[in-house]
């Protein structure tokens, strides 16, 4: 059984090599980085949109308030027939208004600068989206072509694997396939024996029961790294 599984794993390694080469290909990397960017871009657009709306709302409200203050100031300027008390009141009021107007004007300036920077961000984002779309439409099909070019080879290996499956215990095979999905490879490894103890290649020492199982020719799973283990002399 161990021999069959090792043989299976050897053929499986050919399949894995193709899978890894596809995954690490320039075509896939470029296609998937563009796709990831585009997936996140909608959210970025929505956030900027909201920010722009807030700023424009504040900007308009401030402009309106500025108009009101300026009107009020004009009213005070129009009064010329006053006694001293009234005159001193109006003077103070005018000064306060003028100061308020000043502050508001610089706040409006700041808002307008912020709006400008949001617009710049928008333009940049738009350009980036365009670039990512172009990259995706170039490398998406290229990656599909690359995958298609390996299809024959993959099918042949899978047929060989299918044939080898019959010599392997169903449960062990299921476990092997699961570990393979978990990106553990090689799945089946030789346990190391040292002065009457057995170890996984990750360094974990196996229990005496597990060691006994190994010596009886069984496959044992390391509870730390989940690799499957065997003893070659068993
Ligand atoms: Zn381990």
Image: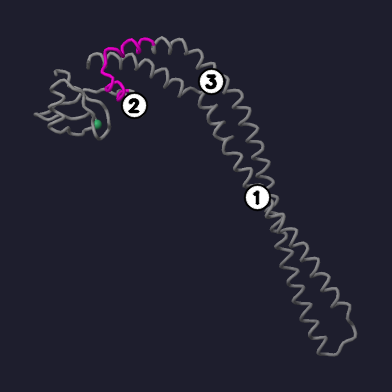
User: Could you tell me residue 141's position as x and y percent?
Assistant: 58, 20
Give whichever of discs 3 and 2 has the lower sequence position: 3
Question: Which element is circle 1 on?
Answer: helix
Q: Main secondary structure of the magenta part?
A: helix
User: What residue sits 51% from the left and 16% below the top?
Assistant: 146
Q: Is residue 162 magenta?
A: yes
Query: Which of the two discs, 2 and 1, sits closer to the camera?
Result: 2
Disc 2 to disc 1: CB gap under 8 Å: no
Q: Quadrant of residue 64?
A: bottom right
Q: Which residue is mark 3?
A: 143
Q: Quadrant of residue 215?
A: top left
> What whole-number distance in Å separates the C-alpha atoms at marks 2 and 1?
45 Å
Query: Which of the two discs, 3 and 2, sits closer to the camera?
Result: 2
Mark drawn on residue 153:
none
Q: Where does the magenta region start and end?
A: 159-176
Give whichever of discs 3 and 1 has the lower sequence position: 1
Q: Is residue 2 magenta?
A: no
Q: Which residue is mark 2?
A: 178
User: What residue sits 79% from the left and 70% below the top?
Assistant: 69
Q: Is residue 224 left or right of residue 45?
A: left
Q: Is residue 180 left or right of residue 151?
A: left
User: Could you tell me residue 100's position as x and y percent?
Assistant: 73, 71
On-image quarter of the C terminus: top left
Q: Quadrant of residue 187?
A: top left
Question: Which element is circle 2 on?
Answer: helix
Total numbered badges shown on the rendered structure: 3
Residue 194 vs 160, above or below: the answer is below
Residue 115 vs 143, above or below: the answer is below
Q: Which residue is mark 1?
A: 50
């Amino acid at each position: 059984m161990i021999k069959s599984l090792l043989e299976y794993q050897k053929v499986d390694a050919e399949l894995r090599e193709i899978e890894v080469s596809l995954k690490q290909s320039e075509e896939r990397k470029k296609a998937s980085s563009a796709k990831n960017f585009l997936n996140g871009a909608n959210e970025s657009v929505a956030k900027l949109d909201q920010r722009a709306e807030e700023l424009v709302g504040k900007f308009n409200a401030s402009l309106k308030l500025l108009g009101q203050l300026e009107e009020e100031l004009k009213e005070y300027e129009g009064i010329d027939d006053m006694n001293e008390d009234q005159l001193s009141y109006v003077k103070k009021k005018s000064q306060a208004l003028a100061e308020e107007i000043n502050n508001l004007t610089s706040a409006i300036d700041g808002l307008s600068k912020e709006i400008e920077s949001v617009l710049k961000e928008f333009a940049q984002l738009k350009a980036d989206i365009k670039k990512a779309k172009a990259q995706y439409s170039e490398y998406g099909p290229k990656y599909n072509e690359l995958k298609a070019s390996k299809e024959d080879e993959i099918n042949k290996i899978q047929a060989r694997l299918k044939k080898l499956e019959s010599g392997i215990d169903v449960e062990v095979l299921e476990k092997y396939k699961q570990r393979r999905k978990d990106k553990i490879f090689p799945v089946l490894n030789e346990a190391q024996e040292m002065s009457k103890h057995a170890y996984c290649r990750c360094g974990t020492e196996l229990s005496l029961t597990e060691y006994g199982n190994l010596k009886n020719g069984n496959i044992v799973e390391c509870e730390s790294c989940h690799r499957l283990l065997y003893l070659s002399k068993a």
